[in-house]
Image (cartoon, rainbow, N blue to C red):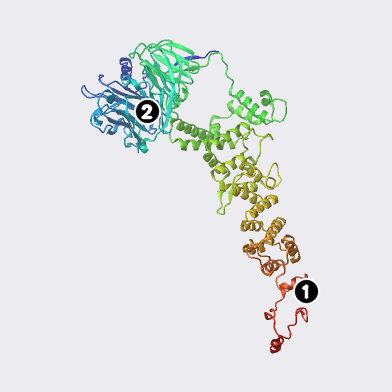
């Protein structure tokens, strides 16, 4: 059934201050310029210079005083005037051709008053030919004397303009803050200036030099770039420039570096320009409406039934909900912006009609919220809304029906049975109480005050979210806005079941804004460092179960979609890799023994390792920390083996000592692994005290020596008293003494000798005197009677046990 376009009367102008003067200017002067304030309450009417007074009228709907100004003959009137998008109070700026700028606003007292006056043109003889007021800035095109740089001739005059920018922001309750002037573009032709919510369009005029009359520029202040477009050629080039950093924005130099733009072409023949959120609409003299998008691309939107006869004819363009609205004379045409099809054509009662921009998002009042989604049309008859209405006879489902239909889809996704649920079953089945409770609320069984109390917190969050979206659309502090929006979205998704669509959306948020998403996780899990390199959490177990769960419903996620735990591990690898092992250790503690050791699915450390990549391509430091912190015997032994291969002896020993007495078997295996290295080479000698501390207390000296003997290198030749130069020194008894003392009992044994080696440890006597070196004659022996006790080797040598 076809929808119908409607004109709904919003006001007959009687509720505006100065209604009689407002109707007089709207009906009497076809060239009057009309602008609307961001909140939709104020209307500004400005007559062109030279028109009879009053030249300026600001009318307000509801309480408030109007502003009416008249300049006598011989005194110039403003070139243009704009409302400033200041949320605290209404304000406007007036700009004269001479460069004078005045900022007017309303304060604590009644009426309008002058807040600040300044001169925009600093050079003598300069004049303003165009001006615009994008958000937070004042931009004007200034014509300077061509002879100032010593140039003569028509080209010098044609390129004697420059585009300048000054910041313009509110300061306090009744002040303004004007920044310094800097040149955005110099040596350029005369441009007209049009602004949307995010971009500034520099469009050619009738007096622009013909060689560049087919070129327009799009400046995006938030992105710091300018797009040079030629719609008739289908070409556009983007340049990242920084005028505040001193980059020369020379127009001619800019065009020389962009091939193809200076091809001979006729200037654009434009009747009307109109900025919209989608881009810049323009109507030519053939009746064709085209759209220049912010990236420079141009496409035809549609063709009107009638074409403008001349520049003198009035025309206005606007867009809403994918619909193009064009007022040409006294005719209103509505076209589909996607197909260009004519949807509706209406004949109006007057040709003095103006299309107004919709209020800025977040600044609408209750009436504007009800009429959101259409354009506003202003004439002397009144203020109308142009929009669509549903055809009569079309029955919309009730709120109660929508509740049960949505609940049916929700429960069906969670149900394991093959039979499908129906809304009727949900209505009469007492098992499903949530949709029935909500339906009873919507039916009015709960009083409005009780419902408002219940939903107050949710409504406050929703209002804050809507204001945040409006701030992003308006382009205010985009980085902080996107960060806050990502945090809201992550917090919302964590309250859901994290099924397929929600999990995919969470992955998208983490890919686009990982820092903001991780900030939301920090708050949800209440993560805090404890000062010892570890993390602690005060989040409830339900949140951790959602984080540690592999999938919902036992189904594997689609390709490229990570479960939440893997998603957090990947995010930490990108942002703060050093916190990944502490996070996995904390997750193992929160999940309990089931998640850390043989619970459902893979252990958490294995899931974290898979995020790091295939084996052999992972960062070694992170892999070692994850293996050591896993608490799994095989993983810890694997990590200690890697440390041994890298000869990081101290860290390998500390890994064993960190196990304390909770894992005696694992600690014993680590000791045996390091003892084998101690037997093979001498690179562990410096860490012998740590090796002694790691020695199991129940290890006997005999077992220790047998272990050492197993790993001692094979001797191919009889041992020499001293190693060869450059060879590895052998293991000595002196090095073994500390380990043997560690395995034996402290003090001298009181019972029988338990081992044939223990007398080495407990002999407290001093060694015998050193025998003389070298052969001795019999005469020398008789001269030293004390040496008779030393007999040749093997004769009379005995060892007496002093015990």
The residue under label 2 is 256
Q: Residue furthest left?
A: 74
Image quarter for residue 94?
A: top left
> Callout 1: 10 Å neighbours few (<14), some, many (20+)?
few
Q: Position of residue 637 (x, y in %)?
A: 68, 52
Left or right of residue 122, residue 39 in this image: right
Discs 1/2, front: 2
Does any portion of residue 14 appear in the rendered image?
A: yes
Earlier residue among tags 1 and 2? 2
Left or right of residue 500, residue 30 in this image: left
Q: Position of residue 151 (x, y in %)?
A: 25, 28
Q: In the image, which disc is placed on residue 375?
A: none
> Callout 2: 10 Å neighbours few (<14), some, many (20+)?
few
The residue under label 1 is 751
Left or right of residue 695, residue 92 in this image: left
Image quarter for residue 12?
A: top left
Q: Quadrant of the C terminus?
A: bottom right
Q: Nearer the viewer, residue 367 or 488?
A: 488
Secondary structure at numbered mark 2:
helix
Q: Position of residue 25 (x, y in %)?
A: 31, 18
Q: Quadrant of the N terminus?
A: top right
């Amino acid at each position: 059934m076809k929808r119908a376009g409607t004109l709904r009367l919003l006001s007959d102008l009687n509720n505006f201050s100065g209604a009689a003067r407002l109707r007089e200017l709207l009906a009497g002067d076809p060239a009057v310029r009309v602008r609307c304030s961001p909140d939709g309450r104020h209307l500004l009417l400005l007559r062109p210079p030279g028109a009879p007074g009053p030249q300026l009228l600001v009318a307000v709907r509801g309480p408030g005083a109007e502003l009416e100004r008249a300049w006598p003959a011989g005194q110039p009137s403003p070139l243009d005037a704009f409302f400033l998008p200041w949320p605290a109070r209404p304000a406007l700026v007036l700009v004269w051709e001479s460069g004078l700028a005045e900022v007017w606003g309303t304060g604590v007292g009644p009426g309008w008053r002058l807040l600040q006056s300044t001169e925009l043109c600093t050079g003598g003889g300069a004049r303003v030919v165009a001006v615009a007021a994008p958000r937070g800035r004042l931009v004007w095109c200034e014509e300077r004397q061509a002879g100032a740089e010593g140039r003569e001739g028509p080209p010098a005059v044609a390129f004697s303009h420059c585009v300048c920018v000054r910041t313009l922001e509110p300061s306090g309750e009744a002040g303004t803050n004007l920044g310094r002037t800097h040149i955005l573009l110099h040596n350029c032709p005369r441009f007209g200036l049009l602004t949307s919510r995010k971009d500034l369009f520099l469009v050619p005029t009738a007096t622009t030099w013909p060689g560049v009359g087919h070129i327009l520029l799009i400046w995006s202040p938030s992105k710091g770039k300018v797009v040079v477009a030629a719609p008739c050629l289908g070409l556009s080039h983007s340049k990242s420039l920084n005028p505040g950093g001193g980059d020369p924005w020379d127009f001619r130099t800019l065009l020389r570096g962009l091939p193809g733009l200076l091809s001979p072409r006729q200037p654009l023949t434009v009747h009307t320009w109109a900025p919209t959120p989608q881009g810049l609409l323009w109507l030519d003299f053939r009746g064709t409406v085209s759209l220049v998008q912010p990236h420079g691309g141009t496409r035809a939107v549609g063709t009107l039934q009638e074409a403008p006869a001349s520049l003198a004819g009035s025309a206005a363009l606007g867009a809403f909900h994918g619909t193009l609205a064009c007022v040409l004379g006294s005719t209103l045409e509505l076209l589909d912006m996607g197909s260009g099809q004519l949807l509706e054509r209406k004949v109006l009662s007057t040709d003095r009609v103006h299309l107004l921009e919709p209020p800025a998002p977040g600044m609408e009042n209750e009436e504007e919220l009800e009429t959101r989604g259409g354009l506003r049309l202003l004439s002397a008859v009144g203020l109308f809304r142009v929009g669509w209405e549903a055809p009569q006879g079309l029955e919309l489902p009730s709120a109660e029906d929508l509740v049960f239909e949505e609940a049916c889809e929700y429960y069906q996704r969670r149900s394991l049975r093959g039979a499908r649920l129906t809304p009727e079953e949900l209505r009469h089945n007492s098992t499903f109480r949530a949709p029935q409770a909500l339906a009873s609320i919507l039916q009015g069984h709960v009083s409005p005050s009780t419902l408002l109390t219940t939903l107050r917190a949710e409504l406050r969050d929703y209002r804050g979210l809507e204001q945040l979206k409006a701030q992003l659309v308006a382009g205010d502090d985009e980085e902080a806005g996107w960060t806050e929006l990502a945090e809201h979205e992550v917090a919302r998704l964590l309250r859901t079941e994290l099924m397929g669509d929600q999990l995919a959306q969470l992955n998208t948020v983490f890919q686009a804004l990982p820092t903001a998403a991780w900030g939301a996780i920090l708050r949800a899990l209440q993560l805090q460092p404890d000062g010892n390199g570890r993390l602690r959490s005060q989040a409830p177990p339900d949140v951790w179960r959602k984080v540690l769960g592999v999938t919902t419903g036992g189904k594997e996620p689609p390709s490229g979609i990570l479960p939440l735990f893997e998603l957090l591990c990947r995010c930490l690898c990108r942002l703060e890799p050093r916190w990944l092992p502490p996070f996995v250790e904390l997750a193992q503690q929160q999940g309990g023994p089931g998640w850390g050791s043989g619970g459902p699915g893979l252990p958490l450390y294995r899931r974290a390792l898979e995020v790091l990549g295939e084996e052999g391509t992972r960062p070694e430091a992170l892999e070692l920390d994850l293996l050591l912190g896993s608490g799994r015997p095989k993983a810890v032994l694997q990590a200690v083996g890697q440390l041994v291969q890298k000869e990081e002896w101290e860290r390998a020993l500390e890994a064993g000592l960190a196990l304390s007495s909770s894992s005696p078997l694992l600690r014993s295996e680590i000791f045996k692994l390091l003892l084998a290295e101690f037997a093979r080479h001498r690179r562990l000698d410096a860490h012998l005290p740590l090796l002694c501390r790691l020695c199991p207390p129940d290890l006997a000296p005999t077992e220790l020596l047998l272990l050492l003997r197993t790993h001692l290198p094979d001797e191919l030749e009889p041992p020499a008293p001293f190693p060869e130069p450059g060879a590895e020194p052998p293991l000595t008894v002196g090095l073994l003494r500390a380990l043997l003392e560690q395995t034996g009992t402290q003090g001298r044994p009181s019972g029988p000798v338990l081992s044939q080696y223990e007398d080495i440890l407990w002999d407290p006597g001093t060694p015998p005197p050193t025998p003389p070196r070298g052969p001795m004659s019999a005469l020398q022996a008789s001269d030293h009677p004390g040496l008779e006790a030393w007999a040749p080797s093997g004769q009379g040598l005995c060892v007496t046990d002093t015990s």
